[in-house]
Amino acid sequence: MRTSDSTDPVIHIDPTLCTGCRRCAGVCPVDAIEGLPGEPQTVNADRCVICGQCVQICSVYASDWADSSPQAAAIRRQERIRERDMPADIGEPLFAAYYSYNLIKVADMMKKPGQLRIVQCAPAIRVSLAEEFGMPFGTLTPGKMAAALRRLGFDRVYDTNFGADVTIMEEGTELIRRVTEGGPLPMFTSCCPAWVRFAEIEYPDLLDHLSSCKSPMQMVGALIKTYGAQLDEVEPANIYSVAIMPCTCKQFECDRPEMESDGYRDVDEVLTTRELAYWIKQRGIDFMNLPDEEFDAPLGQYSGAGTIFGVTGGVMEAAIRTGYELLTNEKLPKLQLDFVRGEEGIRVAEVQVGELQLKVAVVAGLQHAYQLLDRVQAGECDYHFIEVMGCPAGCISGGGQPKLMLEKQKSMLIVHVNRPSMDTMLHLRCANRMRTLLSSSCTMNFWVSR
Amino acid sequence: MSGVRNTLNRSTSRMGSANRTSAVASSFVVADGGQCIGCKACELACFAVHGQASGIGASIGTVSVPVVPKVYVVRAGDTYVPVQCRHCENAPCAHACPVQAIRQEDGVVMIDEERCIGCTSCVLACPFGAIEVSPVYRAGHVITQSGLTHRANRTALPRTAASKCDLCAETENGQPACVEACPNHVLRLANGISDSPPEPRREVFFPRL
Ligand code: SF4
Ligand code: SF4
Ligand code: SF4
Ligand code: SF4
C-alpha cells in the first residue's frame, strides 16, 4: 500500500492513458508537468504543490475501445483501480491524471474498536457534495452531509467553520500586531497548504511574511484532541480524527511534522469531497433522501464568517472585519468589501481602519503570485495583508472537488457559490466567546513555527 | 425509454417515408486535424450531453456507465484526429442498413437506436469510420437482449446499437457540445454546400484511444 508521508508524490499521471495533450501543464502554476507533446507526461514531485488542478482538467479517460475486448477492458480497469487505491466497485471513468486516495485506509481504521471517531468538514463541501449525486450546482446540503457522516460511523460531526472563526480571530489579531508593532509586512494568509508549499519552494526568504496561524483544519484538529477530548472525557490517543476537504494538498498539510501537538497528530487523515461521495455510494446510503441533521455542538457551532473561506477574498473579508473591530471597537460600516481594482488574478482594496489606510490584496491562482512576491522581495509592495489561494476560484475549485465534465460548467460553478449575508454575521462576538471558552479550559496550539 | 436519442419517433418524423435520404444540404462538424492535441474533451462533452437521460449530471461522480461518445478521437502516427459523421447527402450507411434504422432528417443523418439491430453493416459502409456499435445503457444499466445469452455461463448479453454523431440534435442552442468544448478550437460546424467535399476513403488503421 502507498504510504502517505511527505515523499508520496500524491499527484500521478497514468502513462498508459496519458496522450500528452499537456492541458494539465497549461493549468499547473509551477511548471511541474514535464514531457513532450504527444508523449505521456510526468509530475515533478519536487516542484508540485499538490493543488490538483491537473487532475481537474485532464479529460483523457480509459476507453473500452482501446482494449481488444470488453472483457480485456474490464480486467484493465480493475488493475487501474487497484493501482490507484480506489474502491473496487467504483463506476466512474478513470482519467490519466489522478491523486492518491485515502478512503480504503480510513474505512479500515473506522473499524478499530475503542476509539472516538470525529470528523470535521470544510465549508466548500456542503455546496458541492450534492453535485456528485446529480443535484444542481450550489445545492446546499450541510444537513444531509452531517447525517451521512453519522451513518458512516462518526461519533462526532464537527464543522471546520469553527476553526475558520478561530483563524480569523488569530489572524486579525496578528495583522493588527504586525501593523502597529512593525512586523514583517505584507502579511500573507496561511490557510491554503498549496500556497504555503509554493512559498516554501519558490520564495523561502519570504516565509516570515506568512501568518503564523495554522489553517482552520489544523486548528479544529488541535481543538478536537484537546478541548474535544476533555468534553468527551477520552484520551487524545483514542481519538481518530478525519477531515473532509475540497483540497488535494490537505493530506500533505496534515502529514507535516509540525502539525503535531503533544505527540498527537492534529488531524489523522483527510478525505476529499470526491472520496466522501465514493464512500457514501459504496455504503449504499441514499444521500438524496437523508434527513437533515445538525452538526455537533459546541465545536460544530460557528458564526457564519467561516463559510466565505471557501471563496477568494473570504478570509480577507472576515479577518478585516475582525481587525477593524479590534482596533476601533466599532463595526466596519460597510461589511462587504469591494475589491475594485487589480490585475488579472489579483484584486486590491483599501479600507480605512481608524487612522490607518489598510491596503489589502487577494490573489487567486498561484500563477499570479509570482509577480506580487517579486515585488515584495524588491520591497516595492506596500500592501498590509494579502490573501493567497492556490486554486483559480479558491477552495471551491479545489483539486478534490467534484470533477466536472463540461468546461462551461466549471465557470458556472463559481457563480453559484453561496455567499451568506454579511449583515447577519456575529462572528466577532461569537469567536470571542469561543476564545474565552477555549483559553480557560486548556492550552491550544494554534500556531506553526516556520 | 430515453427521449434523447429517439428524435425520429417524434410525431413530425419522416420515418417510414420512401425517400430515405434527401437532397437537403447537410451540416457537419469538421476538424482541423493537425491542431488536435488528443485531449478527448470533445468525447467527454459528447457523452455528457447525450447521457443526461441516463442520469448523468454535471460531475464525473454521477457517471456509472462506460463513456460512450459519438465522436471518436483516433491516433495516426504523431497526429490525433477526431472522427465524426459527415452527414453524407447520399448516406452509404443508410443504404447499407437492412432495417432502415438510418435516415436523413433536415440534413442530419440519424440512427434510430430502438430500431437498430447492431448488425454493423453501417460500420462497414461508412467511409469515415464514424460509427461504432456499443452496448445500450438506460438509467445507468445496460439493456440486455432477450434471448441472447452467453454460451458458457448463460448470462444475458447486452443489446448493442450503432452510435454516431447526431449534431447534438436535442441540445438547446444548436451548437454541438464538442465544438464548444474543444480547447484548441479544432472543431467547427461546417455547411455541406460551401465547404470542402468529403475526403476519399483512407486505407489506414486508426486506433481508438
Ligand atoms: S495527464 Fe491528462 S491532461 Fe495531462 S497531458 Fe496527460 S492526458 Fe493530457
Ligand atoms: S497538482 Fe498542481 S502543482 Fe502539482 S502538477 Fe498538478 S497542477 Fe501542477
Ligand atoms: S455515418 Fe458515415 S456514411 Fe453515414 S452519414 Fe455519417 S459519414 Fe456518411
Ligand atoms: S477536444 Fe479538440 S483537441 Fe481535444 S481531442 Fe477533441 S478535437 Fe482534439
Image (cartoon, rainbow, N blue to C red):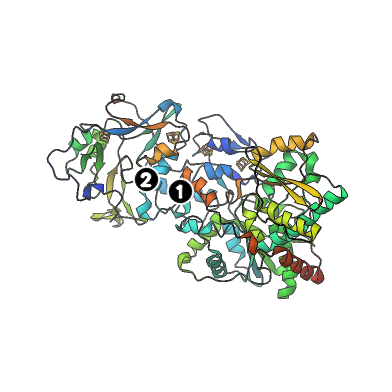
Which residue is the site of mark 1?
A: A93
Q: What amino acid does circle 1 point to?
A: Pro
Instruction: Specify the quadrant of the image occupied by residue A418.
Output: bottom right
- Which element is circle 1 on? loop
Depth order, front residue of A12/A415: A415
Side of A392 where B129 appears, left or right: left
Chain designation of label 1: A
Side of A197 where B48 appears, left or right: left
Chain designation of label 2: B
Residue A231, placed above or below residue B139: below
Q: CA distance from mark 2 to mark 1?
A: 11 Å
| Dot 1 alpha-carbon crowd within 10 angstroms: few under 14, some 14 to 19, many 20 or more | some
Residue drawn at (58%, 38%), measured in percent from left and top?
A27
Q: Can residue B44 be spotted in the picture? A: yes
Residue drawn at (49%, 44%), measured in percent from left and top?
A95
Is the residue at mark 2 from the same chain as the one at mark 1?
no
Q: Quadrant of the C terminus of chain B?
A: top left
x, y (%) of residue B64? 42, 54
Which residue is the site of mark 2?
A: B68
In the rendered picture of this protein, how many numbered marks are placed on residues?
A: 2
| Dot 2 alpha-carbon crowd within 10 angstroms: few under 14, some 14 to 19, many 20 or more | many
Depth order, front residue of A155/A237: A155
Q: What amino acid does circle 2 point to?
A: Val
